[in-house]
Image (cartoon, helix red, strand yellow):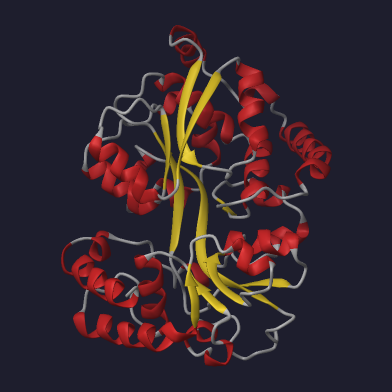
Amino acid sequence: MKRRSFLLWGFALFLSFVISFAISSSGLSADKNFPVPKECMDQVRKEGNRLNIYDWAEWWPEEIYEGFSKEFGVKITRDNFASEDELLTKFKLNPKAQYDLALAGTRIFLQLKELDILQKLNHDWIPNVNQYLPEETKNAWYDPGSNYTAETERYFVGYAYNTKYVDPKDPRIPSWKLLFEGEDYKGRMTMIEGMYIVIGSALKYLGFSYNSDDESELMKAREVLLRQKPWVMAYDAWPKRLVLEEEAWITQCWIGEAWFYHQDMETIRGGLPPEGTVVGTDSLVIPKHAPHPAAAHLFINYLFRPEVNATLIEGIGYAPNHTVTASLLPKEMREWPGVQPSKEFLGKCEFISPKAFTGKGLELRTKIWEELKQ
């Protein structure tokens, strides 16, 4: 779904300089900044120097995996899923699946935890996470104390639009109004293939909670979506071809996807609705039956080195969930919507909560989605 930035290699030298300066200024050695606990390393060797990862295909930059394997001599085997619900189904059918790490969004993490699939992290083995994970994440409602999750980045849903066909001065930009009052772009718009995202966005447009389970509010969102439906050319999770071949002029997407469209086509811009949207984190989690848990911790610790994390963020285009990374990014990326969101904007955003994906909230959303997709 997600692609690497072409800036990675050209920026590597700059990153090395900044990190070296930061280390020398702090008076700390590189070993103190990026420690590898000996007990963890010894256990990695006993486990056979292997690591099995379950994640998105073509998502994180390959040099992250290659750099880890080269430095630590660990052979990585990757299996990929096409959707997070596929990940969830895999573990429901086989709770003892032999993965050491899985990359899960907030909703999927909560569902995996409910199924008792995950093991707690050994924080003695991940000192970089302890040092660089923001305090607000360490105390997040979905995992207080970060007992189970190492949150690698934050994501928001917004949209991309092509300024060749959509006036950037349109007063509906960057509001949700462009999508839900955009009849003049009929047949040139795509929406994400995702029940929670599409219905939640309509709820936010109306001023309601993303996680509402109020029937009257959800029925109003239904009306908005049914009105919009004739304008939508596709419900598509990755409409890259439609966007770059200029068939779609507006596409609802993760704001990081808009960044990658922009790399391929200068006229693409990103919109992040000031009314608020869904926010989430992608987290590395370790299943209970992981055959190589020490290697999993070693990889997590490696990923939270500032220069490695900067490579990750520049490769995926999302907001860093790391106290240092943002300062290492190119200026254009730092200024991209959602990369450094304000506290005011974050206050209007919501995580998908169990209120939406269980009970009445799930039942009503399912009915709306089935009607919308007919």
Quadrant of image for the C terminus:
bottom left
- Residue at image x 71%, y 64%? 262
Residue 182 in the image: x percent, y percent? 53, 88
Say whether residue 368 is left or right of residue 73: left
Say whether residue 87 is left or right of residue 13: left
Above or below 291: residue 192: below
Viewer-proximal residue among 121 and 106: 106
Residue 345 shows up from this direction: yes
- Residue at image x 60%, y 14%? 73
Say whether residue 119 is left or right of residue 252: left
Residue 108 in the image: x percent, y percent? 34, 49
Residue 174 in the image: x percent, y percent? 59, 80
Viewer-proximal residue among 64 and 134: 64
Quadrant of the image occupied by residue 150: top left
Quadrant of the image occupied by residue 17: top right
Above or below 289: residue 365: below
Residue 153 in the image: x percent, y percent? 53, 49
Residue 343 shows up from this direction: no
